[in-house]
Amino acid sequence: MSEKVTLLIVDDHPVVREGLAGMLSGQEDFDVLAQASDGAEAMTLHEKLSPDVTLMDLRMPGTDGVTAIQAIREKRPSANILVLTTYDSDADIVRAIEAGATGYLLKDTPREELFRAIRSAARGESVLAPAVAARLMTRMRAPAEENLSAREIEVLQLVAKGNSNREIGKALHISTATVKTHLIHIFDKLGVADRTAAVTVALERRIITLS
């Protein structure tokens, strides 16, 4: 890590990027190297600049944050990527952390907490927003049969969007039979008998979102 913490900001909203860049540049120990508007641009800039910390939004047009995190970590396993998003569902949190995110913060995080989190992430320390940490603790403490795997969450998220088994299989590059198997496990874990009930329960528990 250099004397200053070098940063890459990734967000599809220009106002958010500029706001973050202006706020972070006001700190003597931060140096904003560049901004990216999507995951693909983030991957290119990260390889070129090797920032100490990347602030990564999750949901962006084109290449999303999780895909970018996975790709960046594959090329540079030591990369510190701090998710900064408005979403705190189980699906978003689990996918980001499994992809290799160093930390997970929400966009309503107070600025001083954000500064501390960036400095911690630059040291390779894990950082979680209190709400995110609470959700993970709840998930860990829940009976094993109630916890959906990351893949099962992906399947259920697509079910919630109205996709058929064939469409889900195509999107996730798995067979229709595998999709059906996942659904059987999902129904069993959630204690429901059909797709509609599974989606309803998952939304109530904030395992998935419709946005």
Image (tube, rainbow, N blue to C red):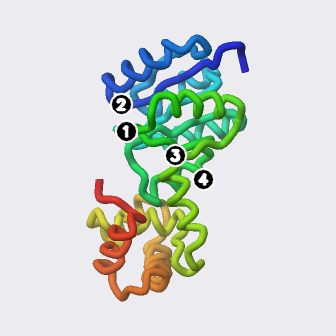
Q: Is residue 196 visible?
A: yes
Q: Mark 2–mark 3 contact, CB under 8 Å?
A: no
Amino acid type of disc 4? Glu
Cα distance between the residues tagged 2 and 3: 22 Å
Cα distance between the residues tagged 2 and 4: 22 Å
Cα distance between the residues tagged 1 and 3: 21 Å
Q: Nearer the viewer, mark 4 or mark 3?
A: 3
**Under tag 4, what secondary structure?**
helix
Amino acid type of disc 3? Ala
Mark 4 surroundings: few (<14), some (14-19) or many (≥20) residues within 10 A: few
Cα distance between the residues tagged 2 and 1: 6 Å
Tell me the residue that label 4 is attached to: 98
Front one among 154 and 13: 13
Q: Mark 2–mark 4 contact, CB under 8 Å?
A: no
With respect to residue 142, does 18 lie above or below? above
Tell me the residue that label 1 is attached to: 60
Tell which circle, 4 or 1, labels the residue nearer the N-terminal end: 1
Tell me the residue that label 2 is attached to: 12
